[in-house]
């Protein structure tokens, strides 16, 4: 569904990504992991034409996205949930949902808003509250709901678990998994909480210093002890059947 | 009604609209619009042209002033601002571009004043618009009508920003343009509408101010420091703050001059512009974030809470 070919991009004149090649198959959850500063967020920003693309191409359903303004990408069915600033803090929860469904008709917005409050019941209680007053977890739920409001074909999720309590982060991961399984949405997820993301993901890419160091099945990456310990902060304790049993230390927080 | 209050209300209503115009454009496009000076003057000349060539009262030409002001805003957006925003120009570049546009508009206003002079034998370079006004209860009608028009305009604006889909999308774009774009909101259209509203507000404000001061081709240039003072006093981050700031600056200018001239003599009139600027500086020393940064809600809550406690 989404193909990134030889992408070189960055901010201003600063290049962050180098010759990146990524393929996101339809109705699958593709996970991009890597240490801080690897260029994971830049990848999503490049797809959304927020970062500067120097060369290479991004194809969505075979159609190049170069030069397409951000709001048109939303109209094409690409929904982006940023890591920071992912809700309108000065608008109510309801207005946030309405803005997320900006391209839909009035009746569609009403139906989808109701649907979102059913999927995320926590939002129902705060529907008329300013989004800025929500807790981190509630905000993240609202951000995902806003992403879903657009009836997306493809969702780009940027580090949804950051700064969340482990139990809330797990809940968020469950929702992501459900979006793929129940709603059939194609997802490209950038994540610091590497182990959990790789467990629920189908395909994985390990990004280091703007380059792809690993691409393949998500499960298989968990069985690459060197890469896991060096870049993802995942340490193995003992070998099982030729593979590794993973004991996780501080994964999802700081990666060395 | 005291004469200073009557003129002060008229003038302050105009200044509130122009300060609101500056603030709106700044929070949406990061552009300090110096062209607000000439946009205000254009508003005055539209009304002046109407009453002198077609007759009637100034009030009936305000819609035309808003339309022409909005058109000057659209021209500035498509001619300058949009191109610079697309190139991610610095704030200083955006600001200087509006100064250039202001000079172009000023030249056109001067040419138009000459055209009125030579073609229609009018005297458009020193105009007392209050001569076209009428009286209500022995007072100038503008002292009642203009604050009401300003309030009505701001009520409509408030309704637009809080109750309509496009208005809410404008607030969303102001808060987070990137997220608004990813939601499918066309920021280009939001910027255009903010220029339309801002141009209309500036022109309407200018036509109000001309009811309290002498209308000249350079009246905008003369009053622009006070328009910006109002916007800065309001805190620059909130359109309602800007409007309130303009109102405070306008009223304090007239009240200050009246009180000081009464006590120290008419020589103080030469320093009239210094009074509101001094009040602006003093207010910002106490509330650096301007009037919109004053936690009014908390203060009222605190007071209310204390009173309830005292009763108990």
Image (cartoon, grey):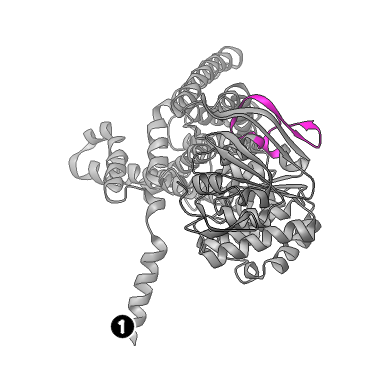
Query: Could you tell me which chain the residue with mark 1 belongs to?
Result: B
Label 1: few (<14), some or many (≥20) within 10 Å?
Answer: few
Q: On the image, numbered disc 1 is attached to which residue?
A: B310
Which of the two residues, A237 or B137, is positioned nearer the viewer here? Answer: A237
Give percent across and percent down for residue B13.
47, 45
Q: Position of residue B56 (x, y in %)?
A: 63, 36
Q: Quadrant of residue A97?
A: bottom right
Residue at the bottom extreme of this rendering? B312
Is residue A61 shown in magenta?
yes
| Residue stretch rendered in magenta on the structure | A47-71
Residue at 62 percent across and 69 percent down: it is A122
Q: Quadrant of the C terminus of chain B?
A: bottom left
Q: Is residue A18 magenta?
A: no
Kindly identify the residue that appears in the image at 36 percent across and 50 percent down.
B2
**Would residue B265 appear left or right of B225 to someone viewing this image?**
left
Depth check: B11 or A184 in front? A184
Please identify the quarter of the rendering in which residue B220 is found: top left
Residue B29, image x and y in percent?
Answer: 54, 35
Quarter of the image where one finds residue B52: top right
Q: Residue at x 62, y 33 (%)?
A: B70
Is residue A47 visible in the rendered image? The answer is yes
Query: Which residue is at the front of the view, B171 or A59?
Result: A59
């Amino acid at each position: 569904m989404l193909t990134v070919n030889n992408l070189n991009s960055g901010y201003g004149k600063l290049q962050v990504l180098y010759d990146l090649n990524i393929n996101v198959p339809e109705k699958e959850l593709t996970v991009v992991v890597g240490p801080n500063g690897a260029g994971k967020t830049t990848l999503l920003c490049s797809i959304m034409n927020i970062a500067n693309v120097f060369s290479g191409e991004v194809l969505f359903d075979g159609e190049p996205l170069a030069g397409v303004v951000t709001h048109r990408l939303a109209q094409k069915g690409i929904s982006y949930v940023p890591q920071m600033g992912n809700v309108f803090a000065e608008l109510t929860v309801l207005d946030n949902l309405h803005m997320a469904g900006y391209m839909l008709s009035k009746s569609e917005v009403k139906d989808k808003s109701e649907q979102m409050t059913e999927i995320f019941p926590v939002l129902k209680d705060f529907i008329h509250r300013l989004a800025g007053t929500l807790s981190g977890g509630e905000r993240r739920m609202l951000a995902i709901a806003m992403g879903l409001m657009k009836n997306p074909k493809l969702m780009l999720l940027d580090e949804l678990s950051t700064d969340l309590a482990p139990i809330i982060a797990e809940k968020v991961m469950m929702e992501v998994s459900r979006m793929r399984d129940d709603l059939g949405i194609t997802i490209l997820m950038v994540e610091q909480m590497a182990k959990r993301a790789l467990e629920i993901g189908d395909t994985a890419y390990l990004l280091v210093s703007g380059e792809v160091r690993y691409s393949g099945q998500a499960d298989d990456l968990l069985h690459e002890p060197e890469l896991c310990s060096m870049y993802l902060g995942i340490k193995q304790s003992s070998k099982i059947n030729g593979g590794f049993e993973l004991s996780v230390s501080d994964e999802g927080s700081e990666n060395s | 009604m005291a004469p200073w209050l009557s003129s002060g209300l008229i003038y302050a209503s105009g200044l509130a609209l122009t300060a609101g115009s500056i603030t709106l454009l700044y929070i949406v496009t990061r552009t300090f619009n110096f062209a607000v000076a000439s946009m205000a003057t254009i508003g005055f000349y539209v009304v002046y042209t109407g009453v002198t060539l077609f007759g009637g009262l100034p009030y009936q030409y305000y819609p035309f002033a808003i339309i022409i002001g909005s058109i000057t805003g659209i021209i500035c957006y498509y001619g300058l601002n949009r191109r610079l925003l697309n190139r991610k120009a610095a704030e200083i570049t955006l600001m200087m571009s509006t100064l250039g546009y202001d000079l172009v508009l000023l030249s056109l206003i001067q040419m138009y004043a000459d055209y009125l002079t030579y073609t229609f034998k009018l005297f458009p370079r020193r105009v007392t618009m209050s001569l076209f006004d009428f009286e209500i209860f022995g007072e100038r009608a503008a002292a009642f009508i203009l604050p009401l028009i300003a309030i009505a305009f701001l009520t409509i604006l408030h309704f637009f920003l809080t109750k309509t889909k496009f208005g809410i999308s404008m607030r969303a774009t102001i808060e987070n343009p990137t997220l608004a774009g990813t939601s499918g909101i066309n920021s280009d259209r939001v910027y255009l509408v903010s220029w339309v509203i801002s141009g209309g507000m500036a022109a309407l404000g200018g036509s109000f101010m001309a009811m309290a001061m002498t209308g000249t081709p350079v009246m905008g240039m003369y009053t622009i420091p006070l328009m910006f003072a109002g916007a800065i006093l309001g805190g620059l981050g909130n359109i309602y703050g800007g409007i309130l700031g303009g109102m405070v600056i306008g009223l304090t200018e007239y009240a200050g001059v009246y009180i000081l001239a009464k006590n120290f003599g008419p020589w103080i009139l030469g320093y009239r512009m210094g009074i509101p600027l001094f009040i602006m500086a003093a207010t910002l020393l106490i509330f650096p974030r301007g009037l919109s940064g004053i936690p009014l809600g908390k203060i009222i809550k605190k007071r209310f809470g204390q009173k309830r406690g005292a009763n108990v």
